[in-house]
Image: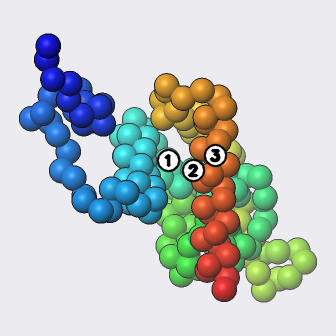
Amino acid sequence: MMARGNDREDRQTGGNPARAQLDAGEAERTVAYKLRLAQILAFRAFEEKLADRGRAPRYLGLLAIIRNHPGEPQSRLADAVALRRSSLVAILDTLTDEGLIERRLSAADRRINGIWLTKKGERIVDELLLESRRHDAMLTAGLTSKETATALDVLDRVIANLRTEDAG
């Protein structure tokens, strides 16, 4: 009878020990490490699939927020995507240069710019959201709908913990 290998390693390497991933030791057992690794892998796959779309795939979350909340000021958008306001300015400049968004003076307060999607931006967001749903299906392959819902709930709680920590 053949000895059975490590199930976790077999999943990572397809049973080929030569393809084994380097172990991060104690970090492997932390939520932060797993979240960051999953984020890198998920976004790399998404961006590679959509390389012809410019930088828009990288900023889909931000673009979706702008679509759902047109005219919001930069400060609110920065808070929504957990970025420093100074970091968001450069991203908004890029998205403006690509013709996806526009800044308009707020009707309520002429000192504030609101951010709006352009027609091109709306079309790109629609296309990217469709691809995002396909990508999500790949990410959750092998999970039941209940497991997916649980994963989303857990991530929401982790995010809430981090936002509370940032505010405190």
In the image: residue 60, left or right of residue 156: left
**Residue on which the image places disc 2:** 60
Q: Nearer the viewer, residue 123 or 26?
A: 26
Quarter occupied by the N terminus: top left
Give the secondary structure at mark 2: helix
119 over 87 or under it: above or below: above
Q: Amino acid at mark 1?
A: Pro
Q: Are marks 2 and 1 in contact (CB under 8 Å)?
A: yes
Give the secondary structure at mark 3: helix
Which mark is on residue 104?
none
- The location of residue 165, given as percent across then percent down, is 62, 79
Q: Kindly tell me whether residue 155 is visible in this rendering.
A: yes
143 over 129 or under it: above or below: above
**Residue on which the image places disc 1:** 57
Which mark is on residue 152?
3
Give the secondary structure at mark 1: helix
64 over 150 or under it: above or below: below
